[in-house]
Amino acid sequence: MILVNGGVPMAFAGTEAPAAYGELISIGGLGPSVNAKLSSTVADILQTKLSIDSSRFYIKFYDVQ
């Protein structure tokens, strides 16, 4: 499930250039290698669909038991 709130003012790394923040919640299955793959995939989507550079987003991972 994804929720996008466009047009929300956001400062990231000291500028207001396009940026994104996300939270990914999973019922098990997360870990360093999975998180890296997910981050890479999200970076590609943000770049191609929303023109947000990979250095301008942050994902918070939650692994719920």
Image (cartoon, grey):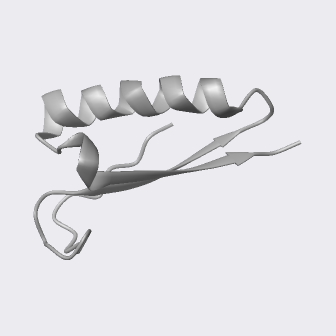
- Tell me which residue sits at (18%, 34%) in the image: 47
Pinpoint residue 26: horizontal percent, then vertical percent.
70, 37
Label count reads 0
- Looking at the image, residue 15 sits to the left or right of residue 44; the answer is left
Q: Is residue 39 above or below residue 59?
A: above
Quadrant that contains the C terminus: top right
Q: Nearer the viewer, residue 7 or 30?
A: 30
- Looking at the image, residue 32 sits to the left or right of residue 50; the answer is right
Q: Nearer the viewer, residue 5 or 59?
A: 59
* Snapshot quadrant of residue 49: top left
- Looking at the image, residue 54 sits to the left or right of residue 22; the answer is left
Pinpoint residue 38: horizontal percent, then vertical percent.
49, 28
Pinpoint residue 59: horizontal percent, then vertical percent.
47, 49
Pinpoint residue 13: horizontal percent, then vertical percent.
25, 69
* Snapshot quadrant of residue 44: top left
- Tell me which residue sits at (18%, 43%) in the image: 53
- Tell me which residue sits at (10%, 40%) in the image: 51
- Tell me which residue sits at (14%, 73%) in the image: 15
